[in-house]
Amino acid sequence: MVDYTKAEMLTRRLESSPQRFFESGAWSALLEQYFNGYPVETLRPWLASDDYYVRKSALCIASELGIEAALLVEDILPVFASTDPELVYYALDIAIIGSHLCPEALVEIAHTMDSENEFLRRRAMVLLSTKRPKYLVPALEALQAHEPDGEHAKGLLSLVNASQLSVETARSFILSARPLLRRYGALIAVHKEESRSGLLKLLEASDDGDLRYFANNVRLDGRCGN
């Protein structure tokens, strides 16, 4: 049950001293109140706040709420324009949870696969790989409408049709001279059930650290073949 007195006391602390609130870990106490049923919608104004620590606390909380944070997915889309990798990292977790409500969230995750920050692009690869190809169609349509000739549209189209691609085509993505297409090749490999094991070995032997990281993650998650 929500302790509204405690929750409101914590929200006042957040708003009056945002940096101290975050750095002291007080946001975790507020998170507990959200787990107990404090209205998730109350995070919205903080997610749009101009104060860095208010926004960061809200993102930390929302990223821990699981499916309850799905309704905030449109609120976190502006975070992807941030130059702060921590904020974007939290936003990724919310975006994947709410992606069924907002195709643009998947587009943002896909774009993050091209980030200069290796932690962000690797996280984006892992998250996007958890979606069945058929659920990526709305994101593909959004990409084709705005950047039809881009590498993302090409890569996502191939990922959506992964089961129909030949092993040779999957290998050509993995061995591409284009880093982004290699990353899409890694995602395609996950959905090539009959040849997944062999393709994962190709990823593991790659000179591309992102591909090796991804292959290891897939094996640790038990998503590899025999």
Image (cartoon, grey):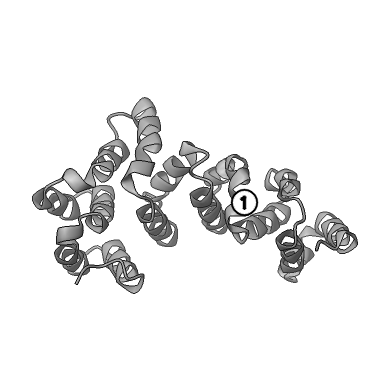
Element type at marker 1?
Answer: helix
Q: Determine which quarter of the picture holds residue 174.
A: bottom left
* 134 over 21 or under it: above or below: above
Residue 96 vs residue 25, the one in the foreground = 96
Q: Quadrant of the N terminus?
A: bottom right
Percent x, y for residue 82?
A: 56, 47
Residue type at mark 1: give it. Answer: Ala
Q: Is residue 152 left or right of residue 100?
A: left
In the displayed structure, 52 sits above or below 28; it is above
Q: Residue 4: percent from the left, percent from the top?
A: 87, 59
Residue found at x 38% / y 56%: 130
Q: Position of residue 88 (x, y in %)?
A: 53, 53
Q: Quadrant of residue 58?
A: bottom right
Tell me the residue that label 1 is attached to. Answer: 69
- Residue occupying image coordinates x 23% and y 52%: 185
Nearer the observer, 106 or 100? 100
Q: Is residue 138 left or right of residue 11?
A: left
- Give percent across and percent down for residue 5: 90, 61
Crowdedness of circle 1 by 10 Å Cα count: few (<14), some, many (20+)? many
Along the viewing direction, whichever of 32 and 143 lies nearer the viewer: 32
Q: Quadrant of the C terminus?
A: bottom left
